[in-house]
Image: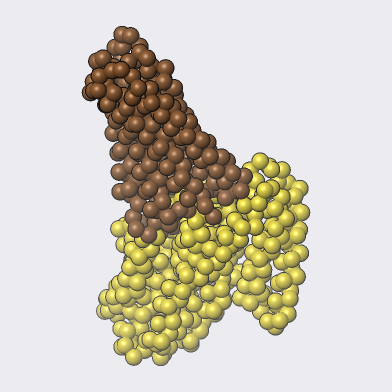
Chain colours: A brown, B yellow
Amino acid sequence: MRIPFFSMFMTSPFEGLQEHAEKVKECAWAFQQAIECHLADKCQTFEEFREEVIRLESEADAIKRRIRGHLPKGTLMPVYNFLLFRYLREQDAVIDAVEDALDWISFRSEPGIPPELEKEFVALADAVIDPIEELSKMVAEARKYFRNYSEDQRVIIKNIIRTLRRQEHEADKAEDIVKQKVLNMNIDAVTVFHMVRLAEIIGSIADHAENAGDMMRAMVAR
Amino acid sequence: MTQPYIILILGYIFGFYMAWNIGANDVANSMASSVGAKAITIRQAIFLAGILNILGAVFIGSHVTNTIRKGIVSTDIMTDPHVALIGALSALLAAALWVSFATWKSLPVSTTHSIVGAMIGFGIMAGGFDVINWGKLFAVVLSWIISPLFSIVIAFIIFKIIVRLILSKKDNFTQALKLSPFFIGITFFVVILSFLFKTPLGKRLALGSQAALTVAVLLSVLLGFAATALLKRYVKDRESGAEAIFQRIQVGTACYVALAQGANDVANAIGPLAVIYFLVKTGSVGAKVPVPVFLLFFGGIGIACGIAMAGHRVMKTMGEKITTLSNTRGFSVEFAAATTVLVASKMGLPVSTTHAAVGGVLGVGFARGMEAVNFGIVFKIMVYWILTVPAAALTSMIIFKILQFIF
């Protein structure tokens, strides 16, 4: 407070946003490993990966609370704070959905995913990995944009958002394939419900990533 | 030793101490954006700020000071030399004390406000409330509100222009180079104008407003293009784009702020000292006293010492803390701050450099140039800005009574 010039500068919420995006990215890897393990015959490490995701989720939560709690009224930023919060909510929803998916699997780990559906689930899981990883890149590019306000930079971000939209569409298709197949299989109703719901949860990961992209689009609007 | 000489020596000590404080605390205003944006190193900043504060103080600093800053207090109380002597000393002491207290308690206060408050305190003690020119005081307080606003507006416009005309363009390096005569030119324009209007040298040239304007325009156009030619020659870093150009221009604006600061703030420290000096030498004092060049130099040296001794710590903090300032932002902040200070001192308003610098940062913040700037802190800062005046006044009153008792 002694030197007013300093006291005006505060920790940038974008730093937190970036940190949060990195956590989300980290959990993509753990998620993929967990799914692959679960599909393998003798999985020993599923719980470990799930624990890892739970840990990452709680860390991401802490970052989210830190950002929200340290943005006093009257903070001047390159974007409206409500946009920032809504972006953060979507980015956080991604990691929540990842955790939900693994939880949902763990509620009924036996008999697990029927062998006939393995290929489709691998395709679905793969389809949602890319959008998760795209987020941290998007935040990093956005920070660059808010620094240099260059049109080229804006185009880079818009391309990432476009990619996210396309990837969400791919993930949707993969989700539909799983659901269609499950509903036409001759298996018990509990498994059907478990599988349909699982496909929906995994699909929602890409939905939230796309929503985050849309929020970002609003943030870089001129 | 006779009593007046003791007072004069005390005046020197506290005048120097005030100047030291200005240097130690306000160096952030001139050099923070440049060091934060990595346009210059800490060593360079200290060196530049020191030299330019001395230059500003000696060459642009007012050579005639109103005995009581800007006529807030009626000069009737100055008729008794003894009272005037004690009054000037107690004002200086009170301001110094208040600034020390603020440093100790980490409060953001302005040396300008402290000295204005202290002078009011002495005025009230010596002549009652009647001697205070409330209208004048109101104008001064108003200027404290207007000057940051003015700075906000300038910084906002400059940064918006930079974004619109340079940053958002495809090849912003070339674009920055193309427009640099404009940015360098307007900087020179303000400096030259203030030089022509404010300095003894400028007054000796005795140019009319029209002639001065013409000279300033011509010179700044010339210098703008000359500087651009130099930039073209030496800046080859196309990769960093416009920032590379502004990195060089920013060195210039940082100097500009340091110069304005020296010119504007030196009176805070040596204004009362000049009164004491004049009284001791001549035995009487009028509404205005001439400030000998050596006193201005003395004040400049005091500021430079403050910068050299405490500046390093301050600069280190800013290098670490202010990472979101890029060169274009730094330029906008500095340009706004220096212009505000020079315009205000031209109008005879005792504004604080701190106000102007804070306004500059907020202006860029409003223009969405920073990742996060806390606007709310301004209200907190304002409370102290306003509290400073009565607090310094009260301290000054008490010290005046004590000194009157002693001498």
Residue nearer the viewer, B48 or A64:
A64
Residue B211 spot, x, y in % from top left: 73, 80
Residue under the point 35% across and 43% down: A89
**Is B359 left or right of A117, judged from the image as shown?**
right
Q: Quadrant of residue B162?
A: bottom right
Name of the residue lying farthest toward the top = A42
* Residue B245 against residue B153 in the figure, above or below: above
Residue A218 x %, y %: 47, 50
Looking at the picture, tell me which residue is in the foreground, B136 or A107: A107
Q: Position of residue B48 (x, y in %)?
A: 58, 54
Q: Residue at image x 68%, y 53%?
A: B176
Residue under the image location 35 percent in, 13 percent down: A115
Picture quarter with the N terminus of chain B: bottom left
Relative placement, left or right, of B391 versus B142 is: left
Q: Quick check: can you spot residue A129?
A: no
B105 or A28, which lies in front? A28
Using the rendered image of the protein, determine whether residue B136 is visible from the camera's viewpoint. Answer: yes
**Relative height, residue B363 to residue A143 (above, below):** below
Which residue lies at the image location 42% right of the left edge and 55% below the top edge? A80
